[in-house]
Image: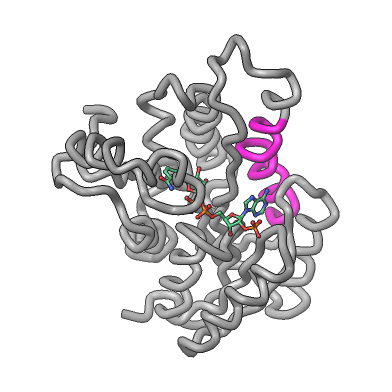
Amino acid sequence: MKRFEGKVAIVTASTQGIGFSIAERLGLEGASVVISSRRQKNVDEAAHKLRSKGIDVFAVVCHVSNPQQRNDLIQQTIQKYGKIDVIVSNAAANPSNDPILQTPDSVLDKLWEINVKATILLLKDAAPHLHKGSSVVIISSIAGYNLPAAMAMYGVTKTALLGLCKALADEMSPNTRVNCVAPGFVPTRFAEFITSNETLRNELAEKTMLGRLGTTEDMAAAAAFLASDDASYITGETIVVAGGMPSRL
Ligand code: NAP
């Protein structure tokens, strides 16, 4: 299936994990993909891996809370390809496992900056270039529905993204669709503090209906669907990709 032939897709935080798999999936389906993350070395390595699979890749360093780098990401994409069809906003931080009321002020700011505000500001920069039929996918989390005590404030920022998705879908309609993917637990570096513990990993797998944790490819499949014209009548929605882990009715 080549749903993204001739399309240009920006994926933030895409040098490993879920973002990398989304870039790979969109690229294998024909998109020119613009990958980015904070470190040049990671960006270069990921670009090399994707190119070795025949994917057209443009690689830019972008720490999502750096205004200049966010702007460069958009402007350099326009200079290179002349358009943007898809934006996947995937970056997040989870710097603390403190209870909410004991989370330091600076950490509250960082969570808001990276997990919520950066998506808003990136889309603000991109909006003038988003034409009819374009699509945005925001990566939230199952933790936005069930807020685990050990990552409650992170979960709150992911709940905020569910609201942001709804509100932006309205604001950016009818030209741009905005949807959200809420991943369950996926063993990546980000989730290592949980998934590297075998007991915890098994407990989490048992909480799913499908008896396993997610893969980055599971998340990429949902993001690609929402970004594609297959979802052309879907906007303001969130797909929970969590193996049936409790989220909502
Ligand atoms: P990951 O495997 O650790 O990958 C993180 C990626 O983000 C790397 O490419 C990293 O590269 C980049 N990155 C980190 N901070 C960044 C920043 N401030 N600006 C730009 N790039 C940044 O993480 P992941 O598990 O795939 O997580 C991706 C998204 O999925 C996040 O939004 C997370 O909340 C969500 N999610 C994950 C899970 C899970 O279980 N893994 C569950 C639910 C939701 P550099 O180090 O080079 O910057």
Q: Quadrant of residue 211?
A: top left
Q: Position of residue 58 (x, y in %)?
A: 66, 77
> Looking at the image, which residue is at 36% across and 49% down?
186
Q: Can you give x and y, in whole percent of width and height, for residue 240 in the image?
A: 32, 42
Where residue 182 sits in the image (x, y, percent)? 39, 42
Residue 89 magenta = no
Quarter location, residue 167: top right
Give coordinates of residue 60: x percent, y percent: 72, 69
Q: Front-most of 43 and 130?
A: 43
Horizontal side of residue 203 vs 32, given as left or right: left
Q: Residue at x 30, y 51 (%)?
A: 214
Along the horizontal axis of the image, is 58 left or right of 249? right
Q: Is residue 132 visible?
A: no
From the viewer's perspective, is residue 231 above or below residue 194? below
Q: What secondary structure is the stretch in magenta mostly built from? A: helix
Instruction: State how the image is colored.
Output: one colour
Residue sitting farthest toward the top: 101
* Quadrant for the N terminus in the image: bottom left
Q: Which residues are magenta?
A: 110-128
Residue at x 46%, y 40% (from the top left corner): 193
Residue 171 shows in the view? yes
Give above or below for 213 relative to 26: above
Residue at image coords 43%, 19%: 149
**Left or right: 114 as drawn, with respect to 234:** right
- Quarter of the rendering occupied by the C terminus: top left
The quadrant where residue 222 appears: bottom left
